[in-house]
Image: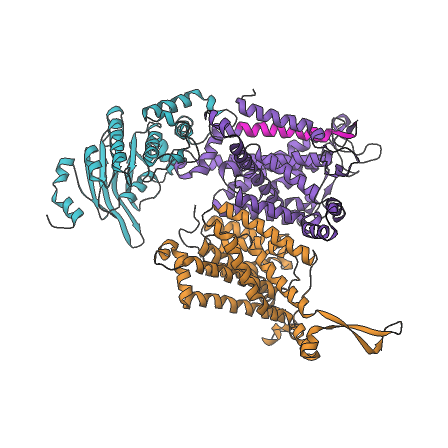
């Protein structure tokens, strides 16, 4: 189906089903129960899952296929956000021009940065991309203030022109308020809630639009992975020398890959702006570049599903871990004797709440040290351990990923 | 003229910090072949050695001062550092005043210990892994170290003043017969620059004139051959890592009066230090030092009012611009060696 | 006039004259061996032919066109394929994918953005790759991870990848270096078969005299960066200058 083989089609369908049912799956705990705060099925968080999923899928097209580690992808994310914001300020509050424009701008910027950075490889490439991203961040926070809003950032305002006619999302205000980003009148923030028994499911328009965009992005990524172009990119990672002596020019392949990857980042940035119409320079900071690297590594570099998993997991933990507090820990360990209870809480305390980054750093180190292939490799190892027989029966006819 | 001299002087202290961090990075890269993204964190840990020591020195107990009364008329309670009890009040106060320089003594063993621990515990397992893996695992380590410091010391900057004797500025211009006040330069920055020069000199002398240094230099040039000679190169590299950590740490210790330490100062310096290493030439020690000072001075020139008026924002990006230009025109950096980290 | 003409090529590295006035004329559809002791400049010469090094002096013409100043991929597109001393293959990919890459390069040129097509749907490419694998006698290994193969198989795959491009000139750089006797003999047989079955010119740099004398029709002896003699294998065998260069003794 869709020009994919059976395995890829089922992967795509599974992801599609997960995206569609996420508001239900991610709310396993009944409303009002003690565990309800671990529900992730609310719009804001689910939007972040899929948006960062797109970002990580795009990053993986570069890092996973070619092995070129970019530390500057945040620049494209930020550029996409700014571009999207300007479309929503100048043209229309409709998200489509914003998203399209953010992809175009990020593509152009990544073309320029890639054209220069790809003259070098290895660590030099990493440093060059890092230098460009830091430059973009510094400029966005200072000189480019007329475009970026500097430290305060960009927001939609009442006096923005929005020149398109009303039915296309133009107009400065709606009932005297700043209009909210919408798709032909459907506001991104609007959702309908379905209470079922003790549960509350929230189906949010913004989330589903992001979800559909992510599925398209995921589908394109699968096609790229299976294409001759993708094969050449894997060949770059495997043996660039052989590729050169096989009559292929690696530069345009790498540049095309870099630009595609940058456009994915821009798309993610544009969606972020469309879901929450404000953007500041910190979105371009190199820690944001580091974050997407983490997501990709955690999920599994070079695999299709890995980056999506990694993005979801990191965003989920970020949310949940930072919500746990000492009171909650005391509740959990209440069954222990008092002294032991306090001890457990003291031990765990540094890793939760504001200490979430510590957990993240440790998790990241553990993954790189023990499981360089990320969660996907972990899953494969588990499957091998428990299902060796089925593994043997399956003929190895599918080309290695 | 005086403006130019002032900018050069201003660039020197930042340049010194860049040079010291880059020197350690290069040592680690040259000897162990590891790209250490946690090196900035070592700089930060050094700075927090100062904070820790001054906290230890000012540990106090409450004493009731019968001669003074608080506003309720009760005898006033005052905090007296334990150190006053040991050395007497004058010496004790002097020791607290000199906490920053004293931290050097404290930081050397601590930082060497941390460095050795890091190399033995983590880095040595990554010698044969790709550079990308090294970058990633040390990046993770940097986050962890940073968060630990944040947990214990909080997110705010913690001031660590220089000794009273070095507070104030030297009227540099006056010495050379210019108008008074034309070039004013804080004493502590002069101290920092001299300290950096001594430290750099010591590292070079150590590498140049000791057998240990000779072996390390040989190892940098050709690791396998030195290994064949039956010299335990691995242990020497471990010590080298400890030394590099100490250099970064000392750079951090002495930098505290210039810039009050906070938990993310390491990351801020790291990015630039990598740029410095690459500009200097991967694996070249003199290159790292030269590039550190050149970029420090360049940055300070770019922050001149006249320059900013001409090219707004150039102060923010000049280092990165310089790096991009140099990498594209001289792929090996200013003093890079052939065959080190080439494509 | 040969398909590959090297005229007065010189190359200097600092104070070392690696090549000085090398002249070489490789006739079409022959096997031409270049032999010489260590440090004779064989590898330098080869690197000058494929664009990795640019000689200081002289000219290198392939089929009437200069190769100098072209990059390796451009020279490959002219019809020169190179086999490396240690087999250079795409270790992370499977054997079939390895074989498909050069065929894509042959069909599509140095770059084509075919990012949406499925590579396995490119029937002509897959067929050509499968056929080449059959020719190379490794069809049963098509889904094997290339890095997991034996050295002999890697060499076989690499040669196959070069042949799949239907080059006019195949350059081999010590193709049997570091191989066991059995693998060496297999490689010799493979090259003989290629020579008999295809219209192809082969230039081979080799250390192993057994390989050279089993294959070559012309031999150039290189010593200290200059060609000593060029002749048929039979004449080379007894040539006093060759013995001198190799054994360092007067004949």
Chain that is purple in the image: A
Q: Position of residue A314 (x, y in %)?
A: 64, 40
Q: How is the image coloured?
A: by chain
Q: Position of residue B69 (x, y in %)?
A: 85, 75
Q: Between C219 and A16, which is closer to the camera in this rendering?
A: A16
Colour chain C appears in = cyan
| Residue that protrudes farthest toward the left in the picture | C251
What secondary structure characterizes most of the magenta part? helix
Say which residue appears at 68% left-offset and 55% top-offset.
B151
Magenta part of the chain: A194-223
A100 displayed left or right of A200: left
Q: Between A314 and A321, which is closer to the camera in this rendering?
A: A321
Q: Is residue A257 above or below residue A393?
A: below
Residue A282 on the magenta span: no
B197 displayed left or right of A151: left
Colour chain B appears in = orange
Kindly indicate the quadrant of the structure image that contains residue C65: top left
């Amino acid at each position: 189906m869709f020009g994919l083989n059976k395995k890829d089609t089922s992967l795509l369908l599974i992801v599609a089903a997960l995206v569609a049912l996420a508001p239900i799956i991610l709310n396993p705990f009944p409303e009002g129960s003690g565990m309800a705060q671990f529900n992730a099925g609310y719009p804001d968080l689910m939007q972040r899952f899929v948006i960062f999923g797109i970002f990580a899928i795009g990053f993986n097209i570069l890092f996973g296929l070619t092995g070129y580690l970019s530390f500057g992808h945040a620049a494209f994310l930020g550029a996409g956000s700014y571009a999207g914001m300007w479309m929503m300020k100048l043209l229309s509050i409709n998200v489509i021009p914003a998203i399209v424009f953010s992809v175009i701008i990020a593509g152009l910027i990544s073309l320029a940065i890639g054209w220069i950075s790809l003259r070098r490889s290895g660590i030099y490439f990493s440093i060059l991309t890092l230098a460009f991203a830091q430059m973009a961040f510094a400029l966005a926070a200072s000189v480019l203030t007329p475009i970026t809003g500097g430290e305060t950032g960009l927001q939609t305002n009442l006096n923005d022109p929005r020149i398109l006619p009303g039915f296309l999302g133009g107009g400065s205000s709606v009932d005297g308020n700043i209009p909210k980003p919408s798709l032909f009148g459907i506001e991104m923030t609007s959702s309908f809630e379905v209470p079922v028994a003790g549960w509350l499911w929230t189906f949010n328009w913004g989330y589903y639009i992001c979800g559909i965009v992510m599925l398209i992005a995921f589908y394109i990524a699968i096609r790229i992975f299976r294409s001759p172009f993708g094969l050449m990119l894997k060949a770059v990672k495997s043996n660039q020398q052989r590729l050169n002596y096989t009559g292929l020019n690696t530069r345009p392949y790498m540049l095309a890959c870099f630009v595609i990857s940058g456009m994915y980042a821009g798309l993610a940035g544009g969606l972020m702006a469309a879901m929450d119409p404000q953007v500041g320079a910190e979105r371009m900071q190199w820690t944001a570049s580091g974050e997407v690297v983490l997501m990709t590594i955690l999920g599994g570099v070079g695999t299709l599903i890995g980056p999506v998993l990694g993005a979801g997991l990191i965003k989920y933990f970020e949310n949940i871990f930072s919500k746990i507090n000492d009171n909650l820990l005391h509740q959990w360990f209440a069954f222990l004797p008092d002294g032991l209870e306090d001890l457990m809480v003291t031990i765990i305390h540094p890793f939760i709440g504001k200490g979430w980054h510590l957990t993240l750093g440790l998790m990241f180190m553990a993954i790189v040290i023990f499981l360089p292939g990320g969660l996907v490799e972990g899953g494969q190892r588990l499957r091998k351990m428990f299902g060796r027989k089925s593994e043997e029966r399956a003929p190895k006819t599918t080309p290695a990923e | 003229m005086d403006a130019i001299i002032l900018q050069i002087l201003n660039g020197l202290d930042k340049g010194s910090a860049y040079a010291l961090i880059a020197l350690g990075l290069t040592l680690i890269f040259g000897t162990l072949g590891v790209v250490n993204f946690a090196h900035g964190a070592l700089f930060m840990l050094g700075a927090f050695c100062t904070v820790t020591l001054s906290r230890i020195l000012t540990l106090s107990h409450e004493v009731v001062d019968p001669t003074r009364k608080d506003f309720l008329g009760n005898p006033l309670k005052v905090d007296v550092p334990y150190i006053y009890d040991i050395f007497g009040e004058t010496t004790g106060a002097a020791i607290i005043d000199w906490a920053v320089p004293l931290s050097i003594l404290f930081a050397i063993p601590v930082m060497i210990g941390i460095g050795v621990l890091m190399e033995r515990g983590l880095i040595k397992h990554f010698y044969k892994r790709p550079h990308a893996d090294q970058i990633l695992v040390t990046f993770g380590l940097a986050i962890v170290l940073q968060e630990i410091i944040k947990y214990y010391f909080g997110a705010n900057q913690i001031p660590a003043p220089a000794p009273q004797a070095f507070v104030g500025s030297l009227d540099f211009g006056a010495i050379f017969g210019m108008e008074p006040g034309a070039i004013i330069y804080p004493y502590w920055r002069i101290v920092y620059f001299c300290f950096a020069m001594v430290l750099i000199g010591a590292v070079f002398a150590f590498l140049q004139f000791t057998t240990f240094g000779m072996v390390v230099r040989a190892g940098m040039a050709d690791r396998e051959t030195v290994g064949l000679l039956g010299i335990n190169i691995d242990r020497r590299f471990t010590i080298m890592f400890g030394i590099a950590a100490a250099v970064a740490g000392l750079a951090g210790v002495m930098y505290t009066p210039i810039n009050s330490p906070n938990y993310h100062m390491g990351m801020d310096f790291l990015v630039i230090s990598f740029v410095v290493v690459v500009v200097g030439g991967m694996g070249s020690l003199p290159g790292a030092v030269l590039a550190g000072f050149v970029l420090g001075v360049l940055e300070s020139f770019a922050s001149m009012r006249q320059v900013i008026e001409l090219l707004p924002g150039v102060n923010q990006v000049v280092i990165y611009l310089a790096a991009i230009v140099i990498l594209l025109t001289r792929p090996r950096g200013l003093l890079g060696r052939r065959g080190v980290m080439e494509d | 006039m040969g398909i590959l003409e090297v005229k007065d090529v010189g190359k200097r590295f600092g104070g070392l004259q690696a090549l000085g006035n090398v002249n070489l004329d490789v006739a079409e559809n022959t096997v031409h061996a270049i032999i010489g002791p260590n440090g004779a400049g064989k590898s330098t010469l080869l690197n000058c032919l494929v664009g990795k090094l640019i000689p200081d002096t002289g000219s290198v013409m392939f089929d009437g066109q200069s190769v100098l100043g072209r990059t390796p991929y451009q020279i490959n597109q002219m019809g020169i394929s190179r086999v490396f001393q240690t087999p250079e293959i795409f270790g992370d990919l499977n054997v079939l994918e390895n074989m498909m890459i050069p065929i894509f390069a042959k069909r599509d040129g140095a770059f084509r953005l075919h990012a949406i097509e499925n590579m396995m749907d490119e029937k002509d490419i897959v067929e050509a790759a499968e056929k080449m694998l059959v020719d190379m006698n490794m069809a049963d290994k098509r889904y094997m991870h290339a890095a997991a193969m034996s050295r002999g198989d890697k060499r076989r795959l690499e040669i196959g990848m070069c042949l799949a491009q239907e080059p006019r000139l195949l350059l081999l750089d010590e193709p049997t270096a570091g191989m066991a006797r059995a693998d060496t003999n297999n490689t010799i047989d493979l090259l003989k078969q290629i020579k008999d079955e295809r219209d192809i010119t082969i230039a081979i740099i080799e250390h192993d005299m057994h390989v050279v004398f089993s294959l070559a029709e012309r031999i150039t002896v290189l010593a200290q960066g200059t060609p000593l003699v060029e002749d048929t294998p039979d004449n080379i065998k007894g040539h006093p200058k060759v013995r001198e260069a190799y054994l360092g003794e007067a004949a």
